[in-house]
Image: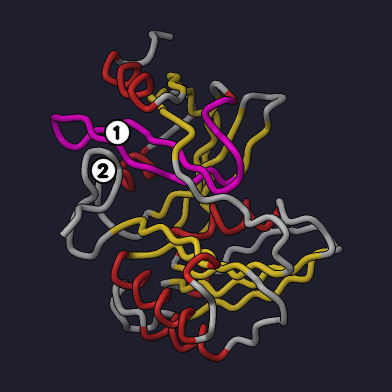
Amino acid sequence: MPPAHRSTLDLAARLGVHADRCNVVGTRELSPSLREIVLHGDPRLVGEPGRDVMVRVRDGERATRRRYSVRWADASTHRFGLWVSVAHEGPGSTWAREAVEGQHVDVVGPRGKIGLAAGAPWHLFVGDLTALAAAYRLAESIETPGRAIFVLEIPDDADAVTAAFDPGLGVTGIFVDRRDRSASDPTGLVSALTAVELPPGDGHAYVFAEAGVARALRAALAARGLPEAAISHKSYWRAGRHNADNGEPERD
């Protein structure tokens, strides 16, 4: 297999992270809107729970990059899984829909700054379908006894993909049906977040969503008494705009 593209190696060197040309070794449909891509490559790409990787994909005649949170990793087999939303049109979703075993793709990582808040007695994960990978992997790293609360909006009932956790972990899961609302409408998630009961103690919240929705959710969390330091947030995408070539949403 040829090495990673020179632009990939140069990017990793500038960022101080790792690069590899990974093999696609498995795919599966998780739901109508979610597909898992399993890659084989350098285990150093993955990082700790909450981190993501940059994947080099085609956008017509040109190359671009998209960022995906790592859902799971097995260092012993050098494999890791990405859960990619295919409920929209774009170069990343096209790659995920068309990926088959035997293909290869350039990957740079680990990227991101969000990690599990050590010592928090409870952890609240809020977001849309794109949040599932990061939320579930972070929750799997919570030491027991502990508590994980999920408030996740899905476009279809069949997208309510769940995960198995340590029996000692207290888990509350709420899936919000988007119904006929726009993916950039925060109404459903804000309503559910306002209604959910939060345990006592100084917990931590993690927000992964569309940029405008993420702002509304942060405001709703602040209204419930969570200080800014207790809210980790990442805008995965911005309504009406393709992400930039670095995989991040375009800025205003």
Residue 233 pos. (x, y %): 44, 61
Q: Which mark is residue 57?
A: 1
Task: Say which residue label 2 marks.
Answer: 91
78 on left or right of 207:
right
Q: Secondary structure at mark 1?
A: strand
> Which residue is more in the foreground, 102 or 181?
181
Asked if the stretch drawn in magenta spans residue 47, the answer is: yes
Residue 131 pos. (x, y %): 48, 60
Asked if the stretch drawn in magenta spans residue 27, the answer is: no
Q: What segment carries the magenta color? A: 44-71
Q: Earlier in the sequence, mark 1 or mark 2?
A: 1
The vertical placement of 213 against 11, above or below, is below
Amino acid type, mark 2: Pro
Residue 175 pos. (x, y %): 55, 77
- Residue 197: name its quadrant: bottom right
- Residue 41: name its quadrant: top right
Answer few, some or many: residues within 10 Å of disc 1's Cα (few below 14, many 20 plus, some between 14 and 19).
Answer: many
Residue at 57%, 58% in the rendered image: 135
Magenta highlight: main SS: strand
58 on left or right of 29:
left
Amino acid type, mark 1: Val
- Evaluate if marks 1 and 2 touch, with contact meaning CB atoms under 8 Å apart: yes
Residue at 43%, 9% in the rendered image: 1
Q: Which mark is residue 68?
A: none
Which residue occupies the extreme top position in the image?
Answer: 2
124 on left or right of 3:
right
Residue at 45%, 19% in the rendered image: 20
Marks 1/2: CA–CA distance: 7 Å
> Which residue is more in the foreground, 178 or 115?
115
Residue 68 pos. (x, y %): 43, 44
